[in-house]
Amino acid sequence: MARMTEDETAIGTQASGENHRWWVLAVVGLAQLMVVLDATIVNIALPSAQRDLGFTDANRQWVVTAYALAFGSLLLLGGRIADLVGRKRVFLIGLVGFSVASAIGGAAPDFGVLVTARALQGSFGALLAPAALSLLTTTFTDPKERAKAFGIYGAIAGTGGAVGLLLGGLLTEYLDWRWCLYVNLLLAVIAFIGGTRLLHAGAPANPPKLDIPGTVLVSLGLFCLVYGFSNAESHPWHTINTWGFLLAGVILIAAFAWWQSRAVHPVLPLRVVLDRNRGASFLGMFISGAGMFGVFLFLTYYLQQSLGYSPVITGVAFLPLVVIMIITSVTATNVLVPRVGARPIVPVGMLFGAGGMAWFTALGLHSSYAANVLPPLLLLGLGLGMIFAPAMSLATAGVEPHDAGVASAMVNTSQQVGGSIGTSLLNTLATSAAAAYLVGRSHTPAALAQSQLHSYSTAYWWSAGFFLFGMVVCAILYPSGRPPIYSGDEQAPVHM
């Protein structure tokens, strides 16, 4: 009997019953939540971890940066490996590796082991995230079901950072900072059991060969970009540790783009990114990721340091953002985009995001949550819901089955690298703004508090600028009209 290919088994998954597909969404969504929330869950735990392990303020950023560096630089490689080896196999390997790395980090006796474990988490996350999204892409091929699935998945991806803040606060306050890492073991076990039972094995049909030069160029290029912006937090922009890595990153990414147009088996085929819907979606995820992760960082500082909220209450304060994003994501992908297309929806979401960020600049030392924090938070959630779910769905719609992994990886790469660059850049700008505010002023408690507010406001204005730029880019790149509807088997457009 002929061996079934992975794409044939994905179709078999559909034939086995509708409930199967939605359980697959639950498993894949849980894995994605685990990967996304780990980008923020340790933020709240860092002060406790620093006291416990005794590392310096200068080294503190590497607990976050190590994860972002490994995750962002290896995502495209992880997506191509999923296309080469098989999505279920890579998905399960990623789950096991991620959970083992989390256990090592939770039990870390010193700073070096903790940072190494975070880098391992990022590496296995780079396998897990694209495999998860490509499984969703090949499982949900009916247009209506696909819209619902991607609405839910987009909400998970967009709100994972806020969930991480809430969960991190609860675990740190009531258990121990180490449980911010141990919690992944529980999530991974549930996802692994579900994955082994629900996902179908099988080798890809005619798997593409691995583009070694392209893989090296893009991995090194992304590493240099993320590392360079991360270094800007502790090194001036004019030092080679900052601009040298940024320049090297730009050169390597340019060389990667040139090579992809000539490689026989490119790691990122140009047909994946040159489609207008997909190209606009990748850029939209990158730009909005840069703005979104900034608000998690600075609004967290504001709520805890300026308003005196506890870690748990800070996490709870983000819940309305989560709720409005889920509602908006499902509505946008199921109702709005199928009727009018992405061109009016995603740019309007960017505009709402910019409005929310600009509104945050009015926050003061005596602002109240209900009157001053909640309204812009809801506006931001409305905007992000209109961006993430439609962009994720359109970024993977219509790709050939053997390109599903790398297309999915590009979605995650865009969001993660955008978030890493945005957070590092905004933190550098905010720190400079606080220092500039104190020039010529006495360093009284009141002046220091106002300098922090000024730094947050600077970051919010820059984030608003990111979103406005994204609005223009998406309005230009997204084509007018309803997006094409793709058939399930062929991933070819069906003209209605």
Image (cartoon, rainbow, N blue to C red):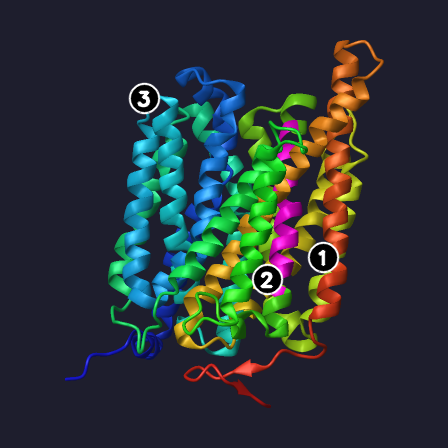
Disc 3 vs disc 1: Cβ atoms closer than 8 Å?
A: no
Residue interval drawn in magenta = 281-301
Res. 36 mark: none
Q: Amino acid at mark 3?
A: Pro
Q: Residue at x 33, y 57 (%)?
A: 91
- Judging depth in this view, the residue of 19 and 92 nearest the camera is 92
> Between marks 3 and 1, how big is the CA–CA gap?
43 Å
Q: Amino acid at mark 2?
A: Phe
Circle 1 residue: 470
Circle 2 residue: 282
Q: Residues within 10 Å of mark 2 (few under 14, many from 20)?
A: many
Res. 109 mark: 3
Dominant SS of magenta comes to: helix
Residue 158 in view (yes/no):
no
Q: Residues within 10 Å of mark 1 (few under 14, many from 20)?
A: many
Residue 58 position, x and y percent, is 53, 22
